[in-house]
Image (cartoon, rainbow, N blue to C red):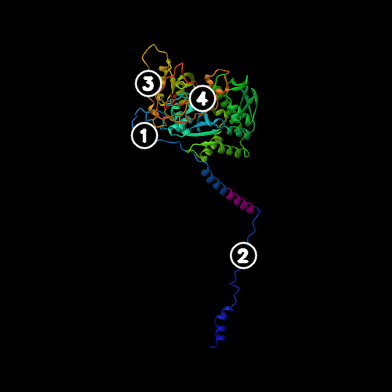
Amino acid sequence: MNPEHRKSTQGGARLEKKPTASRRREKKPRPQLTRKQKTLRILFLVLTVIAAVIVVAAIAYRLLVVKPEPPGITPPAMESSGEIGDYGDGPRLYGDRKEDFFTFMLLGRDTGGGGNTDTIIVMSYDIPNQKLNVISIPRDTMVNVPWDVKKINSVYNYAPYYDKDGVEFVREEVSYLIGFQPDYTFVVEWEAVGELVDAVGPVTFDVPVKMDYEDPDQDLYIHLDAGVQEIDGDKAMQLLRWRKNNKIVDGKLVIYGGYPNGDLGRIETQQAFLKVLFEKCLTSIGLDTIPQMAKIFVDNVDISDNLTMNNIAWFAQEAVLGGLSVEDINFVTLPITSAYAYSRTYGQDLDYVVPIADEMLEIINQYFNPYLEDLELNELDIMSVNADGTLSSTRGVVEDTKANAAVQSSKPSSNPEPVETVEPVTEVSETPASSPEAAESPAVSPSIQPAESPAASITPEATPTPPSEPAATPTPAVTPTSAATPAPVSTPAATEEIEYGPGMEPVA
């Protein structure tokens, strides 16, 4: 067969075959939508988009806002050995807790004054009842520590000598005062308050007294008139840092004035101002201020490792949605009494404040205890000064074993027998032989100086510093006498000339 013929009769014929009309598929026209149908379709699309946005927002919310878990410590399996912090003795570390009840410790650090933690605040936030309770612990509060000058604001700077973190050391010592460990800690630079005031606008406040103080070394200049006035960020810093006035008299710088009730007056002023500032913040929250507030917080606040920014967002959410207002903030006054205790370093009595144990326990259980069961007095460690000048503790143990012996040996006695030498404190055997100097507290010098004393003898923001060279061996305490007592450290030069032993006493 001719190939051309085969092509024309087989494949070629099929290729040339035309589809019939019955096989042709006709395209049906789309039905025209009514206006109602078009509206419903658009509405459906909009609702779908909104639903998708809600789902994404919910996922982001769950990721960004996280409820914190209160730190829990498993009860130790051992019985109490009577040592501090053991099971059954010291602060409570575990137990059945109240629902959504959280506790905090806030330390105010003054970077201009060497980083002192002179502001110590304990807070509790009862979320179901929307109550925020706040109590301030004065920096002169006596605490049960092994060194000589037992003011709580010395603890932070003594931490390196006990191989501890400063903030954690303060948290431990605060826990002995209140009977439990705060869940979370915040360390706030005072500059943050000034920045926050500038972010939300000036605050109207009644300055209680005229304030005039200058310290060029700290770049600190305080000049505020008494009375109601607008307080901006700079004035807020002046207000919060002021303690006393100073001026030049006959070529000498002297200090004078101050709050009539001492450091308690400063605490009251700080609390009153913070309450007004908190109210201002609540009424100023907006899209323009939230970024500023967040930046101030991140730049100036150190938070404990067991708390995240997601947790903080959760607390903020609960406060806003729960309707927390300034009326729900309760500033509680620490029940205290003044006391004087002998210092073997200074050779004289120093002034302290000591909590009133029973009243303290009642306040803690009413406002701050996170546990369902009330705390008991043996879980607090409250110091007191006896009529004879010796020290006592509600826990029954005075950590400074030299303290009471030094008190007895400092008093005139008709007994001709020599006073028995006291051995060095064993509790600090793991620390360097030479410990920080006792001249640690800004409150020490002002409290023992006359009203018109040279300012050179008072360094309001001084911090404890280690002696230049450690003592080679522990030296027993040298009992100061009226004829040869070391004067309180008044200048940096005098500080460098004194060497201190394990019990924080001068080494002869």
Residue at 58% over, 39% down: 295
The crowding category of the residue bearing disc 3, from other C-alpha atoms within 10 Å (few below 14, some 14 to 19, many at least 20), is few
Q: Is residue 272 left or right of residue 438?
A: right
Q: What amino acid type should be assigned to the residue bearing mark 4?
A: Ala
Tell me residue 206's x, y (percent).
62, 24
The label number, if any, that marks residue 76 in the structure image: 1
Which is more foreground, mark 2 or mark 4?
Answer: 4
Of the image marks 2 and 1, the number of the one nearer the N terminus: 2
Q: Which residue is mark 4?
A: 494
The crowding category of the residue bearing disc 2, from other C-alpha atoms within 10 Å (few below 14, some 14 to 19, many at least 20), is few
Of the image marks 1 and 3, the number of the one nearer the N terminus: 1
Q: Is residue 328 left or right of residue 95?
A: right
Q: Which residue is mark 2?
A: 28
Viewer-closest of 368 and 147: 147
Tell me residue 202's x, y (percent).
64, 31
Q: Which residue is mark 3?
A: 421
Work out how far the residue at label 2 is from the one at label 1, CA to CA, in angstroms. Answer: 82 Å
The crowding category of the residue bearing disc 4, from other C-alpha atoms within 10 Å (few below 14, some 14 to 19, many at least 20), is few
Work out how far the residue at label 4 is from the one at label 3, CA to CA, in angstroms. Answer: 27 Å
Tell me residue 249's x, y (percent).
62, 19
Of the image marks 4 and 3, the number of the one nearer the N terminus: 3
Of the image marks 2 and 4, the number of the one nearer the N terminus: 2
Q: What amino acid type should be assigned to the residue bearing mark 3?
A: Thr
